[in-house]
Image (cartoon, rainbow, N blue to C red):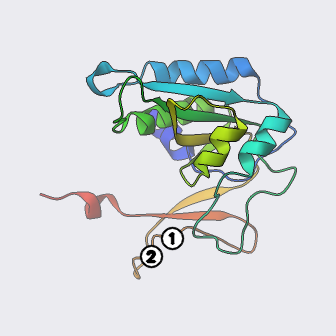
Amino acid sequence: MLKDLMAKNRSYRRFDQNCKIKKETLMELVGLARLSPSGANLQPLKYYLSCDEKTNALIFEQLGWAGYLKDWPGSEEGERPGAYIVILGDTNITKNFGCDYGIAAQSILLGAVEKGLGGCMLATIKKKELARLLNLDSKYEILLVVALGKPKEKVVIEDVGQDGNIKYWRDENNTHHVPKRKLEDLIVS
């Protein structure tokens, strides 16, 4: 059921690094993104796939992992993603990618959850350095990175408290808490 997939689709930042993800799995997930809507049906997105340890390590170092967790530099060795999908915009097709990459990333993550995996969309990226390390053609603009793996952390959704604080946090057991606004607070009528 879609609601169950949505509830399981959290931003995971710690993974079982021993769980390897095959390129075929990444191809299947990009296949879902390919079926997603695209503004004016331009389909300007391209994808760089990585599931090898060396390239994964290069990508990991170019990402910001959790803005609200100031004392946490990112996953330790052994808890890093098993794969990445770097979502690129082909500037030969258009210079305006609208929300296509967000839709594509959501499709990829929902497909990952269906396969027993999890992931995280990352937009804090050292884009120039990552493009250089991946030897990307200059026509490609890095838009998002989707980290994927077998989740190694518990993430719980809870209502935003009386103080209105929406910042996610971790407790003493490393459970990741994600406050969400109540449905009735979102509806304007």
Would you call the spot at circle 1 few (<14 residues within 10 Å), some (14-19), or many (20 or more)? few
**Is 37 on the left or on the right of 177, as rendered?**
left
Q: To which residue does mark 2 refer?
A: 165
Name the residue nearer the viewer: 112 or 141.
Answer: 141
Q: For the residue marked with disc 1, what is the amino acid?
A: Lys
Q: For the residue marked with disc 2, what is the amino acid?
A: Asn
Q: To which residue does mark 1 refer?
A: 167
Alpha carbon of mark 2 to alpha carbon of mark 1: how far? 6 Å
The image quadrant where one finds the C terminus is bottom left
Residue 59 occupies quadrant: top right
Name the residue nearer the viewer: 69 or 143.
Answer: 143
- Residue 173: give x, y in percent of width and height: 76, 69
Number of the label disc, if any, that sits on residue 181: none
**Element under label 2?**
loop
Residue 55 occupies quadrant: top right
Mark yes or no: residue 118 visible.
no
- Residue 127: give x, y in percent of width and height: 59, 47
Would you call the spot at circle 2 few (<14 residues within 10 Å), some (14-19), or many (20 or more)? few
- Residue 111: give x, y in percent of width and height: 56, 28
**Is 185 on the left or on the right of 179, as rendered?**
left
Mark yes or no: residue 184 visible.
yes
Count of numbered badges drawn on the protein: 2
| In the image, residue 170 above or below residue 93 | below
**Element under label 1?**
loop
Mark 2 touches mark 1? (CB < 8 Å): yes
The residue sitting at 82% across, 31% down in the picture is: 52
- Residue 74: give x, y in percent of width and height: 73, 60
